[in-house]
Amino acid sequence: MAKVLITRPEHDDTTYYLSHWSKQAINFAESKGIKVFDLNRENANKKKFEGILEKQKPDFVIVNGHGSSDTLGGHKDQILVQSHKDERILKGTIVYAHTCSAAKTLGPLAVAEGTTSFLGYDEDFIFFYDPKKITTPLQDPTARCFLEPSTEAISSLLKGNTIGEAQKRAKELFVKSINKMISTEASEEDVSMIRYLFWDMRHLILCGDKDAKI
């Protein structure tokens, strides 16, 4: 049985949105009989993260939250993985870093240390949201333009596709969001959103084995 480890911190608006949008993927995985280790809120800490990696050996690791070129963050930005220090804990896994910048330095280093594949963003991952929808993230059409494509990378891999195909599918949905805005009378805010949708699409990169699947 395939195993998935997912972190879902919820200490600010960004992590709250990422957490709720990723919950759909958890429900799908469980419906397919995939074992999910869900580290939500305070449980998204380094001790529990490392413990599950060491004892359960998950096939797919999804990290939602804040990050940098050298780190993956958990709840309240506790560092879960630090480049040049403990990237070896990801050995043998497929990783999706739903964070800023982690694919720039940490991703290649992790692959060099045995991570099978590392999908993530090599610059900031940017999304817009409607503050009026903060309590109902899944009903926020503004956030949907960004988070539907970015979470498609998770869903696609869970459906049995390769990580390379998952990356391609996510990029296709970013293009779909862009085209939808272009086809309508775009406001000044929409024009700004188009720029950042293109940014996210361009900076979603894959290191390692593009044919890996769970």
Image: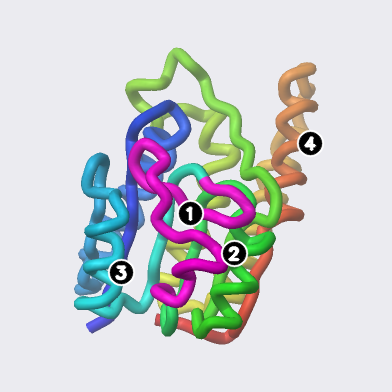
Q: Are marks 2 and 1 in contact (CB under 8 Å)?
A: yes
In this rendering, position of residue 182 left or right of residue 163: right
Q: Which residue is mark 2?
A: 106
* SS of the residue under disc 3: strand
In this rendering, position of residue 89 left or right of residue 118: left
Q: Identify the residue shown where x is 35% and y is 56%.
A: 25
* Closer-to-camera residue (2/52): 52
N-terminal of the pair, mark 2 or mark 4, is 2
Q: Which residue is mark 1?
A: 72
179 vs 161: above or below: above
x then y, percent, for residue 137: 40, 30
Question: Residue 159: in sight, yes or no?
Answer: no
Q: Identify the residue shown where x is 61% and y is 73%.
A: 109
Q: Identify the residue shown where x is 70% and y is 49%.
A: 123
In this rendering, position of residue 175 left or right of residue 209: right
Residues rendered magenta in the picture: 67-90
